[in-house]
Image: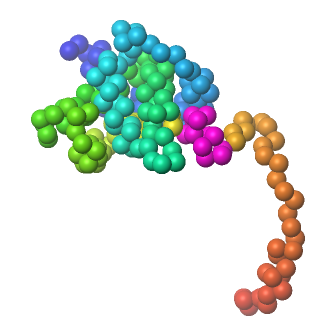
Amino acid sequence: MNNKNKWSRRRFSKAVISAQLLLASGALTLPLACAKTKKSESDSALDSSQQETLKFAMDEIIPANEKMPSASDIGSVTYVLNILEKLPDLSPLFQSLTDKIEVYSLQNSNSIFSDLNKEARINLLVNFEQTEPELFKVLKDFTYESYYTSEKVYELIKYEPYPTGTLGPKMEPFDEKLLNRVKETPSMYTKI
């Protein structure tokens, strides 16, 4: 492995902080959350087995239930692939993340991550979070970012996004009568 591909703690921290700053600033949210392009595997930053690992890991962080879809159901893996296309310096980070999950899985169960049952995958991710907290944080943050910027999720939770600089939702006028009980209650403090 040459030095260019080797991850130092400093390079890892710089990549994570850069990604988090871009995500927090909203620079990645709109263009990438809305992208719906599909890539061939040869064009993708992650191969099919890495994408499968990412899919199952994201689905254990945000699983489906009777009311809400799982992370992969709303396109979280595609969301990450779109980010990796725009920020290729993050590709080794996600390759390392998925590869380490697979190594943990093979070491602990002699099976690939996607073949484990739900309980075993959750237990493995709990252990992964404790032993690889920086990598797990990347997985968790990108899972949440991809999920809660999805228009599908917005509709399901009845969220109406209002971009910065807009007036936002129309609020009902405040009813002053709601304060009458508080105004009529005697003071519970001593004036000095």
The answer to whether 178 appears left or right of 140 in the picture is right
Q: Quadrant of residue 6?
A: top left
The answer to whether 82 appears left or right of 108 in the picture is right
The residue closer to the viewer here, 106 or 165, is 106
Q: Is residue 156 magenta?
A: yes
Say which residue appears at 43% left-offset and 17% top-offset: 88
Say which residue appears at 61% left-offset and 34% top-offset: 151
The residue closer to the viewer here, 16 or 83, is 83
Identify the colour scheme used.
rainbow
Q: Position of residue 83 (x, y in %)?
A: 48, 23
Say which residue appears at 47% left-offset and 15% top-offset: 38
Count of labels in the image: 0
Q: Residue furthest front?
A: 66
* Whether residue 10 is visible: no
Q: Quadrant of residue 95?
A: top left
Q: Quadrant of the C terminus?
A: bottom right
Q: Quadrant of residue 3?
A: top left
Q: Position of residue 12 (x, y in %)?
A: 35, 29
Taking 59 as reference, is 49 above or below it? above
Q: Position of residue 44 (x, y in %)?
A: 39, 14
Type of secondary structure dominating the magenta stretch:
helix
Region in magenta:
148-159
* Whether residue 153 is visible: yes
Q: Quadrant of the N terminus?
A: top left
The residue closer to the viewer here, 106 or 64, is 64
Say which residue appears at 62% left-offset and 40% top-offset: 154
Q: Residue furthest top?
A: 42
The answer to whether 27 appears left or right of 192 in the picture is left
Q: Position of residue 181 (x, y in %)?
A: 81, 82
Q: Is residue 88 magenta?
A: no
